[in-house]
Image (cartoon, grey):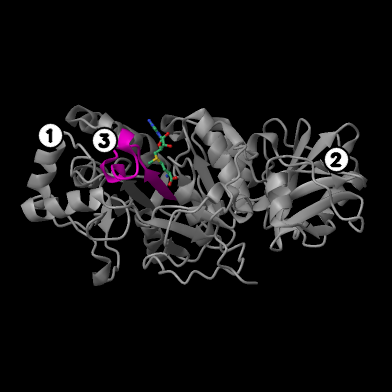
Amino acid sequence: MELPASFIDYTRALLGDEEYTELVTALESEQPVSIRLNPLKPFGFQSGESAVPWCTSGFYLKERLTFTFDPLFHAGCYYVQEASSMFVEQALRQYAGEEPAVMLDLCAAPGGKSTHVRGILPENSLLVANEVIRNRSQILAENLTKWGHPDVVVTNSDPSDFTPLEEFFDVILTDVPCSGEGMFRKDPVAVSEWSSENVEICRQRQRRIISDIWPCLKPGGLLIYSTCTYNTKENEENVRWIKDEFGAEVLPLDVAEDWNITGNLLQGERFPVYRFLPHKTKGEGFFLAVLRKPRASVRKPGAEQAFALGKASETPAVRGEKPRGKGRKPQGKGMKTPGLSKEQLSVLAEWLLAPDIYEFIQKGGSVSAFPKRYLPELSALQSSVRIVQAGLEIAGQKGKDWIPAHALAVSHALAPDAFPREEISYEQAVAYLRKEAVTLSDAAPRGVVLLTYKNMPLGFVKNIGNRANNLYPQEWRIRSGHLPEKPKIVISYEL
Ligand SMILES: C[S@@+](CC[C@H](N)C(=O)[O-])C[C@H]1O[C@@H](n2cnc3c(N)ncnc32)[C@H](O)[C@@H]1O
């Protein structure tokens, strides 16, 4: 690996000769492979491998597998994620409390941390996952849909579009775009694109992002700041800047000594930060700090203080709007179900495990279920940011019929007996995921059938007897025509 000269000089000075040499040796070695299991979709994973110590659902694998050809990967049973970044779990477990929270993951695509935090947030929380780049926001939506949690809004907006949503979020995660030094082993492009000038550009951009989003954090709310880079300019210097500029408190985390985390590397500073270096921990480079917004805002000394972390439905209004009280009707387009009769609505309701907690929202030929308790928040979001998807899409219109949406098949909110199920083989599952025609056994029921693989829902077909029409989303299909002779998949499970 040919590292840029100025990176070598800077990092050698930062870590010292001995550690720098160890870092370079680690960068030349093979990268560890790890996955994070979906707590909503236990599939009897038996790793025989070591657990990621700072993440309750993270596991190292012995080798890289052909994930594309594992139906359970497409079913959202696990996410392939490098281990260091799973440390975000510690910030939430130690500070998010037990009350429902409204959380924003601002720089969220492809969704590694969004899928992770969604499972950790207290019950009845709402996650808003945002990605500024449009096609990446689609990938984010896909990954969150497969993860199967209905209480999620995916947005595609610039951080500055959020600014009017004052004191809206209990927790904001900013996994900011950075110079990517921690990705050198994983991604050669990160090496070729690195320059001192780019580090400076990143640092400025990161500060702009934080400035844009800071007003959206509730007094007493948490900011989790993370990068995948080593240098102090994008890390400690920015944390110090947030502390000084906004009066934030930098919070310590309890960590085990044998996690080998490196702390503050900025001369003369001691505030707590957490840096993963690949020669010390099994994972890529990562940096994280947790900050708390002062309860009395430094910038607005008279600001409301009653909105402590966790009071999701009591947040003050978006600037210039009425307070968002309980029972306030949502505004905006697409918030009704005009094309659906009462009978149709009651059929859709039967597809859900707990229909009463959702409002059905029709938009064009699609109906989604959105948690009623967060309708005011949805309404406020609609007034500021571009919404890619909100809640769970449950049905799409085909002619006069409403057929179940794919998202419902892989959602935790699906009523288990809403549709007949048919267990399929590995070969059938791969064919289904390639959106090829699937033939079911003669005994299989007619009509809409939920296909399962290892008892995990994969998606719907419409069985018409001699064949079953494949309802898997065209844009998500496995595109690779090549199927490895012996696909290496996460087969070490027993049910
Ligand atoms: C480190 S990646 C996020 C990884 C993601 N959190 C995960 O765990 O899968 C940073 C993200 O920030 C987005 N981004 C780039 N420029 C941005 C900007 N100016 N404001 C906000 N996000 C930006 C990138 O498109 C990228 O998806």
- Between 378 and 232, the residue placed more toward the observer is 232
Residue 320 rendering spot, x and y as whole percentages: 51, 32
Q: Choose between 127 and 262: the one closer to the eye.
A: 262
Label 3 neighbour load within 10 Å: few <14, some 14-19, many 20+: many
Which type of secondary structure does the marked residue at label 3 adopt? helix
Q: Residue at x 37, y 68 (%)?
A: 53
Q: Earlier in the sequence, mark 2 or mark 1?
A: 1
How far is mark 2 from mark 1, CA to CA? Answer: 61 Å
Per the image, is 215 magenta? no
- The picture quadrant where one finds residue 468 is top right
Q: Quadrant of residue 366?
A: top right
Q: Is residue 177 left or right of residue 443?
A: left
Residue placed at 19% from the left, 58% from the top?
Answer: 263
The amino acid pointed to by label 1 is: Ala
Q: Which residue is under mark 3?
A: 191
- Label 1's element? helix
Q: Is residue 441 visible?
A: yes
Left or right of 387? Residue 195 is left
Which residue is label 2 attached to?
A: 402
Report the span colored magenta: 171-189
Q: Position of residue 424 (x, y in %)?
A: 76, 57
Relative to 140, 95 lies left or right: left
The residue under label 2 is which amino acid type?
A: Trp
Q: In the image, residue 132 lies at what x, y percent?
A: 46, 31
Position of 249 relative to 393 (above/below): below
